[in-house]
Amino acid sequence: MRTTDPTQIAFAKALLQGEGIDCFELDVNISILEGSTGIFPRRIMVAERDFWRARATLTDNGLPVDE
């Protein structure tokens, strides 16, 4: 998942953690360095073994997922 919306990131992480899926947020530092204007998207990554379950969890809750 990739987005510039910090509320979507927080929601996605909460959903995934609630399902027992480990996730990691990427690009946090670049987002902070650019002044938090939202130009650079942040990404949520999961292990390959959890991809389909994570994708279903996010899409079932209306969040966009990159493949």
Image (cartoon, helix red, strand yellow):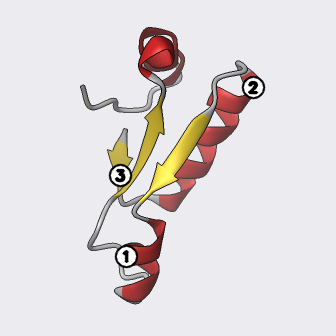
Q: Where is residue 44 shown, x and y percent of the image?
A: 45, 43
Instruction: Reply above or below: 29 against 62.
Output: below
**Residue identifier under label 3:** 3
Q: Is residue 64 left or right of residue 19?
A: left
* Residue 8 in sight: no
Closer to the N terminus: mark 2 or mark 1? 2
Q: Residue 30 carries which label?
A: 1
Kind of residue sitting beneath label 2: Gly
Callout 2: SS: helix
**Quarter holding residue 14:** top right
Q: What residue type is labelled 1?
A: Ile
Which residue sits at x=41%, y=19%?
48
Q: Which residue is drawn at 51% across and 60% down?
A: 6
* SS state under label 3: strand
Q: In this view, does 21 lie above or below 64?
A: above
Q: Can residue 38 be seen in this view?
A: yes
Q: Nearer the viewer, mark 2 or mark 1?
A: 1
Relative to 28, does residue 19 appear above or below in the rendering? Answer: above
Amino acid type, mark 3: Thr
Quadrant location of the N terminus in the rendered image: top left
Q: Hey, which quadrant is residue 19 in on the image? A: top right
The residues bearing labels 2 and 1 have C-alpha atoms spaced at a distance of 27 Å
Quadrant the C terminus occupies: top left
Residue that label 2 marks: 18
